[in-house]
Amino acid sequence: MIGRHRHLVGLEGLSREEILQVLDLATSMKEVLSRPVKKVPSLRGKTVVNLFFETSTRTRSSFEIAAKVLSADALNWTASASSVTKGETLLDTAKNLEAMRPDVLVVRHAASGAPNFLARHVACAVVSAGDGAHEHPSQGLLDCFTLRERLGALEGRTVAIVGDISHSRVARSDLHSLPKLGARVRLCGPPTMIPKGVEALGATVHHDLRSAVEGADAVVMLRIQHERIGDPLIPNTREYSKFWGLNARKAAEWLKPGAVILHPGPINRGVELSSDVADGPHSVILDQVQNGVAVRMAILYLLAGGSAEGPRPEKA
Amino acid sequence: MNAEAVGRAVRRMAREILERARAAGDVDSLAMVGIRRGGIHLAERLRDEIGRAVGSPPPLGTLDIALYRDDLAARGVAPVVGPTDIRFRLEGRTIVLADDVLYTGRTVRAALDELVDFGRPRRVWLAVLVDRGGRELPIAADFAGAQLDVPQEEDVQVHWREAGAAEDAVVIRARRGS
């Protein structure tokens, strides 16, 4: 359980305390990753099924490693190599997998709400690994974890999220978590990529990159979600890069000295980030990947039966 | 046990540990590892006592055994996971594993499992402030501050000053909910 929740389908419904519960536990989990033997027996005998209807490298591997470090058995199931290509429905697929009695089902799907739907129909815990343009909760949590690790407490800090906000589930999960930890969020991108009324979620909107990143403690750069865009929203990527991309010159002139740059990956080098910035001193992109394993260990541990709070067990 | 008795017990244990370490020629390779949370205070005090006696305190680490418990499935709810922190190599060392109360032995079993995942110590001794009996596994303390025979319906609690208690004390009281 994460606080009151048996599933993790998004960060919108999580309270500040529930988010902190995962982040604090992830700190302990991260220590496990630095041990000589990177394996602890806590989820021995539990099964984690990765059910991926969309392509993924980072997230799926990350959940798989997280499960294995905790000694759970991890089963990977990708749609392109499955009965879905033979016409099976999402619910039938899930029901069949459920019959194999997994403890946690990790789902990625192109349709927003698919994890929610499954959570209502299966007995095991469901974790969203990204659904459409809705949310990507484990990414949101690892962004919070990385920012907390780099900046300390997030109260009063400013985070700029730049790019295709409309189609980004990462932006949405960040928006549902960072303000709860006290951070101020600025959104920046072409007007066609900023959803109307997004200020209601507690963010300010900027259409000029410089005004968005100047004075910010952190900048989250996003990829253009070409796969979720029908009609073109920008003239071309070269123009996008000129106005909304971050290169070394802009970073040097506009960013605060200690500011960090995040990116959920995969990076389109030369579009939203130039290589010298992606690999430069401000970048914490590879920290994010490492922290992702720790955060997903915490999520799996909590949902497969663990708890990070409540009374200590009696002395044994 | 009152504060004075706890202090006496800790000093006596430190003396006994040193005697045995000297006999084995192991004083230089001694290291303390406390099991979170009560065992940390015992480990710190033993380290300080030994440090005073030999001039330099042995290194100290902490273990949190939450991820090594064998009852996650049975309990449904796992305990708090805290940090484990061992910054020295275990190879060739004599480790004094410290906990406040020894009961079923399951915590020590988990701690040993976790410890050997960090390396291969030369030997491990177990030091506990209170051995209350009731073992469910074949585990025994090498050094005990007190041996008590406490019935199952009762709890042994150790209050340490370091954990906010007004003074050190060992208290036996009826288990909550029974």
Image (tube, rainbow, N blue to C red):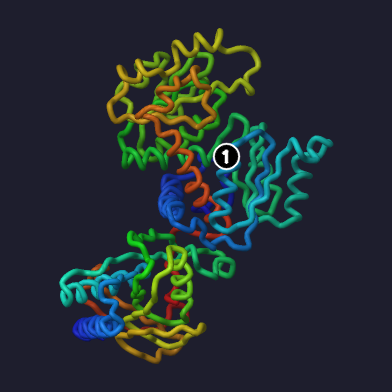
Residue positioned 40% across, 89% down in the render:
B150
Left or right: where does residue A55 sit relative to residue B139? right
Q: Quadrant of residue B146?
A: bottom left
Residue pictured at 18% horizontal, 75% vertical? B54
Considering every residue shown, the one lying at the far right of the view is A86
Position of residue A268 relative to residue B156, above or below, is above
- Count of number-bearing discs: 1
Q: Is residue A70 visible?
A: yes
- The x and y percentages for residue A168 are 54, 27
Residue A34 percent across, percent down from the top left: 43, 52
Neighbours of disc 1 within 10 Å: few (<14), some (14-19), many (20+): many
Residue B124 versus residue A155 in the image, above or below: below
Q: Nearer the viewer, residue A90 or B114?
A: B114
Residue at the image point whose x is 67% and y is 39% from the top: A52
The residue at which mark 1 appears reads as A59
Locate residue A246 relative to residue A131 in the image: left or right.
left
Q: Position of residue B55 (x, y in %)?
A: 15, 72
**Residue type pointed to by label 1:** Thr
Residue A124 rendering spot, x and y as whole percentages: 66, 54
Inspect this view and state whether residue B9 appears: no
The disc numbered 1 marks a residue on which chain? A
